[in-house]
Image (tube, grey):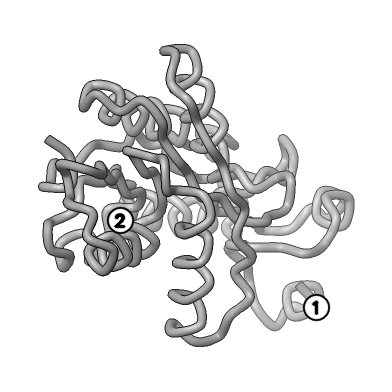
Amino acid sequence: MNMLLRNKVDGIIVGSTQQTLEEYTRMQLPIVTLDIDLGENIPCVRANHEQGGRLAARKLIDNGCRHVFQLTTEANTNTLALIRNDTFRREVEANGLLCSTANLKRDEFYIEDYQQSTERVYDEFTQEADGIFVTDIEAAIAIHWAQKRGRHIPEDLKIVGYDGTYFSRLTHPELTTIKQPLEKVAHSAVDNLIHLIEHEPIESTHIIYNVSILEGDTTI
């Protein structure tokens, strides 16, 4: 932000923020956000997380799950990606299923530490669960965790990931996941930032792209 104020850069794309909303909204500068709501004056590009939460919930419901678990993370209240978790919980509970939720602090610098802390959460919260909804990397950890404990996928435990990253194609069994349109989001963020830098109008300050489901073998 200081570089932008000193004209060292022409614009910025914000992917995370610890600054307050007011610090951004009072600046009439070329700023575009990814998954962060900084007010009506700052364009935000994101995936349709409401749709993603519903798709994930419906997949586990249709697979006959009765008690599902989801893992969330601590985030700023204007982080829009977590909409998927709220939508998922509402959809699951509206269909008469139990939904357990745990919050995981993502403050580890090493994947081994992150894996261990994630597995501890699974040990505590998923003994009774027959369905899990987490990000792709957490889903990969869940598959490894379940296999070590003799839980068969998808017979004993169904898993739906979120993101559609390369992690989802590397797991065994291959992960069923909600795919974000990452390339579209990236291109849109850059295009809108260029328009702002060149003082050209943009079509909307809220650009949302639909997600899709990639079928894998962690659901039936």
Closest to the observer, 63 or 195: 63
Is residue 201 at all visible to an observer of this figure?
A: no
Residue 123: percent from left, percent from top:
47, 59
Residue 74: percent from left, percent from top:
67, 56
Residue bearing mark 2 = 183
Q: Nearer the viewer, mark 2 or mark 1?
A: 2
Q: Where 196 sits versus 155, above or below?
A: below
Q: Quadrant of residue 1?
A: bottom right
Residue 89: percent from left, percent from top:
52, 28
Q: Looking at the image, do the residues carrying marks 2 and 1 touch, with CB atoms under 8 Å apart? A: no
Q: Quadrant of residue 198?
A: bottom right
Question: Which disc, if any, is residue 217?
Answer: none
Label 1 sits on what residue type? Asn
Is residue 200 at all visible to an observer of this figure?
A: yes
Query: Which type of secondary structure does the marked residue at label 1 adopt?
Result: helix
Closest to the observer, 205 or 49: 49
Residue bearing mark 1 = 2
Q: Quadrant of residue 10?
A: bottom right
Label 2 sits on what residue type? Glu
